[in-house]
């Protein structure tokens, strides 16, 4: 997963003939199950000796959202329940939380 | 210092190959099912039992980090099979399935892809399948939809295996079903035991219907 990320950053950098990538902003949806810490760990290893070596990785985490079937409240889950915090009704997933994309890079 | 807005899906390259796989398998009239479950969930036994019950010809693409134990079980029963060894990777990607599809001499039927045992990464990589089939099982517990929501959100159907173990484990079926319903309200849930064969009549009937729908829609 991180290899795909590094490859994409390098491809974008090469297209623009930049000398150094200093920052990469990645958007991750909660439902992807991806861990920002492990992406960071592998990114540092995989980007060694490339223009992205040493780049700062920042993450924007998008929470999954649920909509209550009974009262229509939009809410984020808490642990081990997908039920509505207002009325206790059953929530259904709204289409959010599956994201995994590069939003931007900062270059020199 | 300059900021460049990119907005590119990190899995774009994989998704392009997955699309190519879809074209290949459609040309071969294959309905491709991506089976995802944890190690020891009973995926191999499930596939063997499903094939016994299906009236449609079947083949298998086996994904494992290493070894060909599962592929041999298929071959012993004269089921067409191709083994993929990922060599360390915890999931199959579209590229490896592309090679397997080309190596598999099989047309007009159902191909089961047995993904590497893992509930997280396999659900992120599209392989060109018609749909994902999520597998949970009784001994591993009723909380899987809450802990691994991505898989249960993306799956077209869910299998709950080892249903014969219910008397021996504290498995709260309502809690399990509620979790799946929140993520995926319309997915059918099949309760089966690959060991005893319980529940496979219903599952086979459903999958055959999916296969015939696929053939008619083409």
Image (cartoon, rainbow, N blue to C red):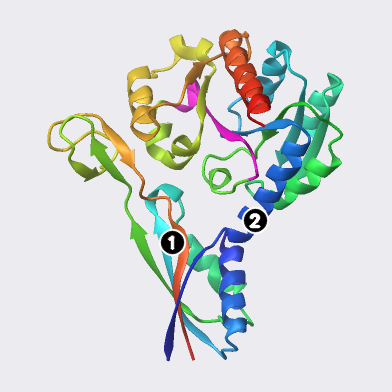
Q: Is B135 inside the magenta-drawn segment?
A: yes
Q: Residue at x 60, y 64 (%)?
A: A4
| Residue A22 x/y as whole percent | 47, 84
Residue for badge 2: B16
The image quadrant where one finds the N terminus of chain A is: bottom right
Mark linked to residue B4: none
Q: Chain of mark 2?
A: B
Residue depicted at 61% across the width and 29% down the height: B40
Looking at the rendered structure, the secondary structure element under dot 1 is helix
- Residue at the location (51% across, 17% down)? B190
- Label 2 crowd (10 A; few <14 / some 14-19 / many >=20): some
Q: Secondary structure at mark 2?
A: helix
Is any part of residue B12 visible from this angle? yes
Labels 2 and 1 in the same subunit: no
- Chain letter of the residue beneath label 1 in the structure image: A
Quadrant hosting residue B153: top left
A94 is higher (above) or lower (below) than B45: below
Residue at screen point 62% across, 70% down: A7
* Label 2 close to label 1 by CB (< 8 Å): no
Image spot of residue B109 (x, y percent): 75, 25
Rounded to the nearest angstrom, the CA distance separating label 2 from label 1 is: 25 Å
Is B156 on the left or on the right of B44, as rendered? left
Q: How many marks?
A: 2
Q: Give the residue pinned by disc 1.
A: A36
Label 1 Cα crowd, 10 Å radius (few <14 / some 14-19 / many 20+): some
Q: Nearer the viewer, mark 2 or mark 1?
A: 2
Q: Position of residue B20 (x, y in %)?
A: 71, 50
Foreground residue, B127 or B150? B127
Q: Nearer the viewer, residue B100 or A52?
A: B100
* B21 sits to left or right of B158: right
Give the magenta range.
B127-141
Residue A18 appears at what percent x and percent y?
Answer: 56, 89
């Amino acid at each position: 997963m991180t290899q795909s990320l590094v490859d994409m950053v390098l491809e974008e950098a090469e297209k623009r003939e930049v000398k150094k990538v200093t920052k990469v902003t990645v958007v991750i949806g909660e439902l992807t199950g991806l861990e920002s810490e492990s992406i960071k760990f592998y990114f540092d290893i995989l980007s060694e000796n490339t223009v992205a070596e040493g780049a700062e990785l920042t993450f924007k985490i998008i929470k999954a959202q649920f909509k209550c079937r009974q009262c229509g409240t939009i809410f984020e889950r808490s642990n081990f329940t997908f039920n509505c915090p207002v009325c206790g009704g059953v929530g259904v997933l709204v289409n959010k939380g599956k994201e995994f994309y590069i939003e931007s890079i900062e270059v020199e | 210092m300059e900021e460049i807005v990119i907005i590119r899906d990190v899995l774009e390259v994989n998704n392009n190959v997955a699309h190519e796989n879809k074209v290949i398998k459609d040309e071969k009239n294959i309905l491709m099912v991506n089976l995802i479950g944890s190690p020891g969930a009973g995926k191999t036994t499930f596939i063997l039992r499903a094939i016994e019950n299906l009236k449609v010809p079947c083949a298998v693409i086996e994904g494992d980090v290493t070894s060909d134990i599962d592929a041999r079980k298929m071959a012993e029963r004269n089921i067409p099979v191709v083994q993929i060894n990922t060599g360390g990777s915890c999931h199959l990607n579209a590229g490896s399935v592309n090679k397997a599809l080309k190596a598999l001499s099989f047309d007009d039927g159902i191909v089961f892809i047995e993904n590497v045992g893992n509930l997280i990464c396999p659900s992120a990589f599209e392989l060109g399948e018609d749909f994902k089939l999520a597998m949970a099982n009784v001994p591993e517990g009723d909380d899987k939809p809450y802990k691994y929501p991505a898989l249960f959100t993306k799956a077209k159907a869910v299998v709950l295996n080892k249903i014969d173990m219910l008397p021996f484990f504290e498995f709260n079926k309502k809690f399990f079903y509620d979790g799946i319903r929140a993520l995926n309200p319309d997915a059918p849930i099949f309760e089966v035991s690959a060991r005893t064969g319980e529940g496979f009549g219903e599952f086979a009937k459903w999958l055959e219907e999916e296969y015939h729908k696929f053939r008619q829609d083409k």
